[in-house]
Amino acid sequence: MSIKTDIGFTTQDQIFVRGRNLSEDILGKMDFIDMIYFTATGQEPSAPLRAMMNAIIVTATDHGLTPSAIAARMTILGAPESLQGAVAAGLLGAGNHFLGTMQNAAQFAQDHIGSLTLESPDAEVAAQARSVVKSYRAAKRILPGMGHPIHIHGDPRTPRLRQIARDNGFDGKHWRFMCAVEQAAKDEYGRLLPMNAAGAVGASVSDMGLAPIWARAFALIGRSAGLLAHLMDEAAKPLGQKIWDLILAQDDSAQLAGLAPRN
Amino acid sequence: MSIKTDIGFTTQDQIFVRGRNLSEDILGKMDFIDMIYFTATGQEPSAPLRAMMNAIIVTATDHGLTPSAIAARMTILGAPESLQGAVAAGLLGAGNHFLGTMQNAAQFAQDHIGSLTLESPDAEVAAQARSVVKSYRAAKRILPGMGHPIHIHGDPRTPRLRQIARDNGFDGKHWRFMCAVEQAAKDEYGRLLPMNAAGAVGASVSDMGLAPIWARAFALIGRSAGLLAHLMDEAAKPLGQKIWDLILAQDDSAQLAGLAPRN
Amino acid sequence: MSIKTDIGFTTQDQIFVRGRNLSEDILGKMDFIDMIYFTATGQEPSAPLRAMMNAIIVTATDHGLTPSAIAARMTILGAPESLQGAVAAGLLGAGNHFLGTMQNAAQFAQDHIGSLTLESPDAEVAAQARSVVKSYRAAKRILPGMGHPIHIHGDPRTPRLRQIARDNGFDGKHWRFMCAVEQAAKDEYGRLLPMNAAGAVGASVSDMGLAPIWARAFALIGRSAGLLAHLMDEAAKPLGQKIWDLILAQDDSAQLAGLAPRN
Amino acid sequence: MSIKTDIGFTTQDQIFVRGRNLSEDILGKMDFIDMIYFTATGQEPSAPLRAMMNAIIVTATDHGLTPSAIAARMTILGAPESLQGAVAAGLLGAGNHFLGTMQNAAQFAQDHIGSLTLESPDAEVAAQARSVVKSYRAAKRILPGMGHPIHIHGDPRTPRLRQIARDNGFDGKHWRFMCAVEQAAKDEYGRLLPMNAAGAVGASVSDMGLAPIWARAFALIGRSAGLLAHLMDEAAKPLGQKIWDLILAQDDSAQLAGLAPRN
């Protein structure tokens, strides 16, 4: 039985990744963003691919006290001996509702684009988008990549990501289809469900020619950096205990039971 | 009570990271490597810092079927619905024995360098290194950053990382001290305990002026990318079941008990 | 805003779980198996419920070097400082393919039983089971709770769990339906796809009147104990390094590349 | 190379755990609490051991919105597809500050009891305890098992656990030593640092003749059940979003920046 991976191997004297000598041919010559792509595919990304990957991973890095940042901070509070445990706890929340939605949106775009192309007539694109939206609505399924609880007038990342996609040649048929879905959703629901960052990433990843799993991969790589920033911040200016106190202060169980509260 | 972090916040229309508008001032303008540093510190890295960070994180990305890659592949075998769970399982092994050693080596260098500088006489550096090695040996503690089970004649990453450190101005007093420790260990134990990649990263991070936690952070970010490459590879060319079969095939419990084996 | 859970709260002097004083009314009076049910529901289990819960959780505890045990052992190899990290890594594999299948089987039974009862004519039960099997086959979906890669003639746990279910009054309509599915699968596929332990647990949990999530909960509680046994065994008689060596020994990449192998 | 564990193995027809047939000799005959001990040691616990294990694991199960419960609820909010991920996130916080302290207290008791016995003169026990407390204070180390942020007049679980230990023959020399440490800490610091539940568990586990790792194992098994109760409660009466909203409502960054807040 041969158990090996094309990713790499180690000899007594050298380490090889995708057939290249790590020390001689990779270190100092390849940036991390290149290495992400190279380790997974054995090829260096083109300049446009690199630019788009950077934009997507930067988008996923962080923006404040998200549930995964809270989970990571709660975890380091109990287990300061394991930085990796707190990062893992934070990443575990990157699923079907948050962050993992990037993959779901890419899957949605690739599953439903059918034979549409950039040359398809507008009416055909619109009809297909409408049909998909209607079937999702009938099945009471959430439309991946559309709508945002805070950015109700539009997600500020979406136009910027589209511009970067356009600048790099990735504003292709999947972007076109997802924009049609946004419009169809507005028509169908009678209110704006703006394409969110997950939708924009899903469209971009699809127009980059990558499988949907890449979107979740980018999300997890970016978020690992964001979580580490939170954990370094927690070490310097702890919030975890305050967060716990805040939550406990809302619990009036003791008072209702006629008992002295906890503090 | 005010609970907030300097890392960032969200308004209805915008997202801010470290005071900058994510869409307008970060996306498309900052690479991911810059974003890692910026999210944690609020500052963009200098060019030398960026180069050194890239080399360190690339070093941590991957090199084959490590225990954390095996754990990730075993996990996706049972729970294909959760890519994040498999990444988390893999990262959980980045601890005091593997990968996390980068932090331990940085801590070691910063704890024991005392008042040594680049100007200290050679004899003084050597004496301090010898004293530290002797005390670790007396306490039966492992010397962080020294020795490697496979690369017994020298870790190929170490000289390359030192060269990159030199090229970027980070071959400073901590590198000097760690090299003296390597020499002292050879003298004390009578055989080479070559400085490994963790030692090289620990020295570099210290000479970059960063706290030891940064070394583990870099390791976790890099490894997250390596694990995702393994998980994409597992989806394309599955090894997990083969690995399990291989392990079970070594178990002769059934035969010893006079029973028919499992298959 | 009131944020509280009925599960429990703490005062300066006491701890309450589901309205009972932990120290005075629970400790020493309730076994852990009772506490599992009590913490989740606020009620103590009946004797039959307790017996069935014990059988299910014991089933989930362990049986050898499963992928989740391997993942846990790989994790402690790298991060011996975090026992909880190794347990977490092992549990992360309890998903849709292994262990979590208990929940999927319960969901399947509860989704497809329709209006069948213990009084329904045999032919009606068989027809419904056949219909479900045919629709799963047409959709190329795996039948939850049926088939086993090793126990191809029958899973030894299934008849035993059914007997315990019968002894405790839980051999009800869901068991009847799942047995009909097993028969229908045999008819449809032309070979035995024996009901496995996950199917037996799914049927039992459903006939206990519990939601499917309970099946995965029981699986995770039981497996946490099994993983800790593996981790204590690993501390006493380490296998992790051997497993890694075994896997690496199968990799002939170095030889193929004309290089000296790793050791 | 033989890779096997004494824990168990599987044949085509049977499953063996610690040499017993799972279906015939374990299921329906052994409770889960027995199975925990049996899987790890190959022996069934005595009645007193079983009673004490039950009390310890029940103690660890839960008491309200702890940081690990919060982490688990934050995680399921983002990744509802992975119950195991949310449990894993919660367990990752069972470390050196919370829950894992049970192991640390057991380690402390076993490390420092020296040659003390139940027959040692009171003065000798007191002197040894005083010496340990003084050395911990001098090294600015936290005394494991002593003090509680909420139960400042005494942890209600401690006397109850001691009574259960006494009833079962486990109120031995380690309990005696830990009580002496509590007294010595009061003398040394001039205020009560009451022995907490972790200290009580640490003393009990030590007087049960078990290694310290057992204390963390019991904590993790019990907490897995508590976390699952929280996650079922979250599914029925969601708190996760409320908790996130509450935390974000404390962040006045947007106002300070003169921007419209998030909602």
Image (cartoon, coloured by chain):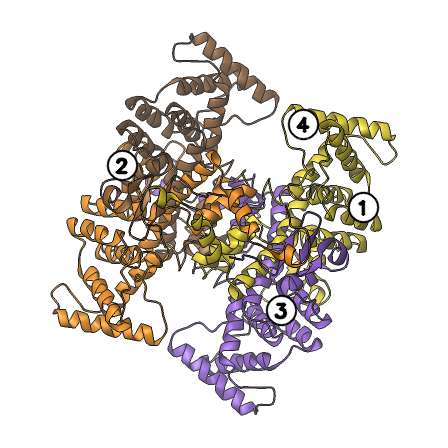
Chain colours: A yellow, B purple, C brown, D orange
- Three-letter residue code for mark 1: Phe
Question: Which residue appears at 35% of the width and 54% of the height?
Answer: D216
For discs 4 and 3, the disc positioned in front in the rendered view: 4
The CA span between labels 2 and 1 is 61 Å
| Element under disc 4 | helix
Q: Which is nearer the N-term, disc 4 or disc 1?
A: 4
The circle drawn on residue B107 is none
Indicate the chain on which mark 1 is placed.
Answer: A
Mark 4 vs mark 3: tell me if same chain: no
| Element under disc 1 | loop
The CA span between labels 4 and 3 is 52 Å
| Element under disc 2 | loop
Please indicate whether residue C87 sits to the left or right of residue D78 in the image: left
- Three-letter residue code for mark 4: Tyr
- Three-letter residue code for mark 3: Arg
Please indicate whether residue B180 sits to the left or right of residue A168 in the image: left
Q: Is residue A141 visible?
A: yes
Disc 4 target residue: A136
For discs 3 and 1, the disc positioned in front in the rendered view: 1
Disc 1 target residue: A170
Indicate the chain on which mark 2 is placed.
Answer: D
Disc 2 target residue: D30
Q: Nearer the viewer, residue C48 or D178?
A: D178
**Image quadrant in which you'd find residue A39:** bottom right
